Image: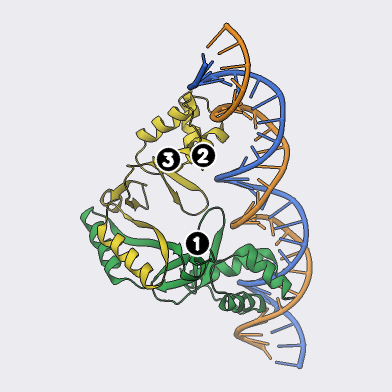
Chain colours: A yellow, B green, C orange, D blue
DNA sequence: GTGTTCATGAGAATCATTCTCGCACGGCGG
DNA sequence: CCGCCGTGCGAGAATGATTCTCATGAACAC
């Protein structure tokens, strides 16, 4: 269970750098296409591998919606998202009450080692006016 | 935008009946296999179609985890799940506080037309002792 | 610099899900 | 009860995201 040493490569930093520039969630396929446009040739499989590693390290969040997974750079502290259904813009929100609520409900039912995932979807102000 | 009439067929009831017997979430592939074992021959595509229809009607919940989607019979009122990571057992939980919290946070950020999805994972008492 | 090891890349493989299309059956008017 | 129309069914092909394979190239330690 020892940590595998993570080797620093051009491709891996490219993926991370690209994610820093993005605003909302992006799919692996999107990111791959964007990298190629930039002239930064990276294999598709490598993009997937890099993303998995970043998720493991907690530097990136995954969102599994219909069909394909989307990724986004995030702060390393626990938080949830408010996602615009239309433009994909994302706001990170912390929520101590929900944390406590989840822990309490789980305990009541005898569940241990609790995790939770919460996503809030809506239409942001900008998109609503169009 | 009128409701398409939903035709009652042997296959559709078979899927629903099978879901009633199941305890936790089951994948479409699982359900298909189970139906065949039962000697109740139903096409895989039909299982998918039936499940989609059931989800549309709010009779079944979907859970998208890694890779494949899982379905479960559920009560038609809004609720969330407490799922055992190990055995897949599920408890439905209602949570007025979270509803309010989500609505409030969304409003603060100018988001309208809000939905949310929340799943709590843990290890249930039975599995923890093993 | 040299060697070892891990990451990369191109394409093939995998696998869940959806589509296609000809046929069967449910529901309704006669 | 009979037959029509449209929708649902089934088998297999198609799709599309993700993962695997394997030979080559690049990081890191010494």
Q: Residue B111 appears at what percent x and percent y?
A: 27, 55
> Label 2 to label 3, Cα distance in Å?
21 Å
Q: Which mark is residue A57?
A: 3
> Label 3 to label 1, Cα distance in Å?
21 Å
Q: Residue A127 appears at what percent x and percent y?
A: 30, 50
Assess disc 2: are there few (<14), some (14-19) or many (≥20) residues with their C-alpha within 10 Å of its C-alpha.
some
Left or right: B126 in relation to B105: right
Q: Chain of mark 3?
A: A
Q: What residue sits right under mark 2 in the picture?
A: A29
Q: Are marks 1 and 2 on the same chain?
A: no
Q: Are marks 2 and 3 on the same chain?
A: yes
Q: Residue A84 appears at what percent x and percent y?
A: 34, 51
Q: Mark 3: which secondary structure?
A: loop
The answer to whether the residues at label 2 and label 3 have Cβ atoms under 8 Å apart is no
Which of the image's four quarters has the N terminus of chain B? bottom left
State whether residue B9 is above or below residue B48.
below
Quadrant hosting residue B10: bottom right
For residue B120, say whether it is visible: no
> Label 1 to label 2, Cα distance in Å?
29 Å
Q: Mark 2: which secondary structure?
A: helix
In front of the other: A75 or A89: A75
Q: Residue A15 appears at what percent x and percent y?
A: 45, 32
Q: Residue at x 51, y 56 (%)?
A: B65
Q: Which mark is residue B85?
A: 1
In the rendered picture of this protein, how many numbered marks are placed on residues?
A: 3
Left or right: A129 in relation to D14: left
Q: Chain of mark 2?
A: A
For residue A28, say whether it is visible: yes
Q: Chain of mark 1?
A: B
């Amino acid at each position: 269970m020892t940590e595998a040493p993570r080797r620093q490569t051009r491709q891996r930093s490219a993926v991370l750098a690209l994610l820093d520039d993005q605003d909302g969630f992006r799919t692996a396929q999107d990111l791959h296409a964007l990298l190629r446009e930039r002239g930064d040739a990276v294999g598709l499989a490598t993009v997937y591998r890099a993303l998995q590693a970043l998720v493991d390290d907690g530097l990136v969040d995954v969102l599994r919606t219909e069909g394909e997974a989307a990724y986004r750079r995030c702060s390393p502290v626990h938080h949830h998202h408010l996602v615009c259904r239309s433009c994909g813009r994302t706001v990170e929100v912390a929520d101590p009450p929900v944390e406590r609520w989840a822990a309490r409900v789980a305990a009541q039912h005898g569940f241990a080692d609790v995790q939770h995932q919460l996503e809030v979807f809506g239409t942001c102000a900008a998109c609503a006016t169009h």
